[in-house]
């Protein structure tokens, strides 16, 4: 038993050394980085396929492994400090940086809602990053998030959800801190929409490196915000025209919803929804 603990201790030391080495070698200064942040259920998986199809000089990934969920939650819950989280995240993305250099590509796009929890350290990892914030109408997001069944048959913030999701209890000043344990899945998902969008919006971004887009105006409404996105990324008009056909085959959409449209919600659900959406959290 003592030998096992000794071996485990040695492995932890070696892993820490490896993380520190990769962190020091992780220099993204020559790479144009775009991070797509959202609540999830905003077409982020689609965008990874989309940009890989239309850009020859880019690598676009959706929630690359490790997906930063555990690290982000640990940072928010003060289980790791900024310095430790920075070293871990740099190490986790080191192999991607090496692939970019090996393939002589100069654009990296990561669509990953888990990065919202790492906002405090992102600028230190990607000095030239630009933020693409996609927001979906809250009513439609709630329907989509609850209806999407993940691996092992669980739904987001459902009873079988295996991930230690961020909650109102993680924030002392959150108005729903003491009410969380009595929240329904519907209320928890609504809170998630409000909290994640607030975390993104309340960050002091450089205006030239941040853009907020509407999910609806990207995929519908004459693709108004897709045009804005391409302008933000300095992509030529011919690529924009070429890309429109791909929007008709969006990945990872919920074809069946298990809750009705907002107009059909119960009065109590409507009240609960509006209370959370209009709160300051």
Image (cartoon, helix red, strand yellow):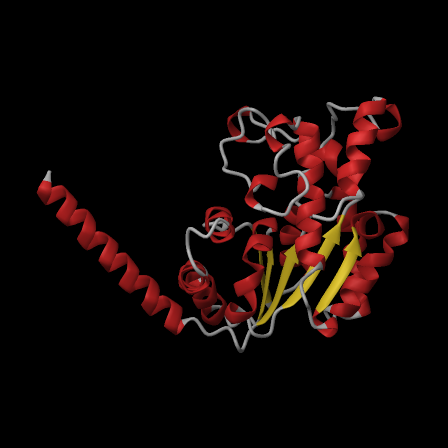
**Does residue 100 appear anywhere in the picture?**
yes
Residue at x-position 78% and y-position 57%: 213
Q: Is 188 on the left-hand or right-hand side of 140?
A: left
Give the percent coordinates (x, y) of residue 30.
54, 78
Q: Is 85 on the left-hand or right-hand side of 158?
A: left
Q: On screen, 6 above or below 151? A: below
Residue 257 picture quarter: top right
Count of marks, rendered view:
0
Residue nearest the observer in this picture, 134 or 101: 134
Q: On screen, 167 above or below 209? A: above
**Does residue 251 appear anywhere in the picture?**
no
Q: Is 264 on the left-hand or right-hand side of 28?
A: right
Residue at x-position 74% and y-position 72%: 207
Q: On screen, 260 above or below 22? A: above
Q: Please identify the residue farthest to the bottom as the structure is shown.
A: 30
**Image quadrant for the N terminus?**
top left
Residue nearest the observer in this picture, 81 or 132: 81
Give the percent coordinates (x, y) of residue 194.
72, 45
Residue 272 picture quarter: top right
Give the percent coordinates (x, y) of residue 50.
68, 53
Residue at x-position 72% and y-position 58%: 201
Give the percent coordinates (x, y) of residue 56.
62, 65
């Amino acid at each position: 038993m003592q030998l096992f603990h000794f071996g485990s201790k040695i492995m932890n030391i070696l892993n820490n050394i490896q993380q520190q080495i990769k962190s020091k070698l992780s220099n993204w200064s020559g790479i144009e980085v775009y991070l797509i942040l959202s609540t999830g259920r905003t077409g982020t998986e689609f965008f990874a396929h989309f940009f890989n199809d239309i850009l020859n000089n880019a690598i676009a990934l959706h929630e690359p492994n490790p997906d930063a969920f555990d690290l982000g939650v640990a940072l928010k819950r003060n289980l790791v400090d900024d310095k430790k989280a920075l070293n871990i995240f740099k190490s986790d993305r080191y192999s991607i940086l090496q692939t970019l250099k090996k393939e002589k590509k100069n654009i990296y796009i990561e669509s990953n809602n888990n990065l919202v929890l790492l906002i405090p350290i992102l600028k230190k990892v990607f000095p030239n990053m630009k933020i693409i914030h996609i927001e979906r109408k809250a009513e439609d997001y709630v329907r989509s998030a609850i209806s999407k069944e993940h691996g092992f048959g669980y739904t987001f913030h459902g009873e079988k959800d295996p991930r230690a999701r961020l909650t109102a209890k993680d924030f002392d000043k959150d108005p729903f801190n003491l009410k969380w344990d009595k929240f329904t899945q519907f209320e928890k998902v609504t809170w998630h929409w409000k909290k994640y969008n607030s975390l993104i919006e309340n960050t002091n971004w450089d205006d030239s490196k941040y853009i907020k887009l509407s999910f609806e105006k990207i995929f519908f409404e004459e693709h108004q915000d897709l045009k804005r996105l391409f302008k933000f990324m300095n992509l030529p008009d011919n690529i924009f025209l070429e890309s429109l056909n791909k929007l008709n085959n969006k990945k990872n959409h919920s074809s069946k919803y298990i809750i009705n449209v907002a107009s059909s919600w119960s009065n109590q659900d409507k009240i609960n929804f509006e209370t959370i959406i209009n709160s300051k959290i």
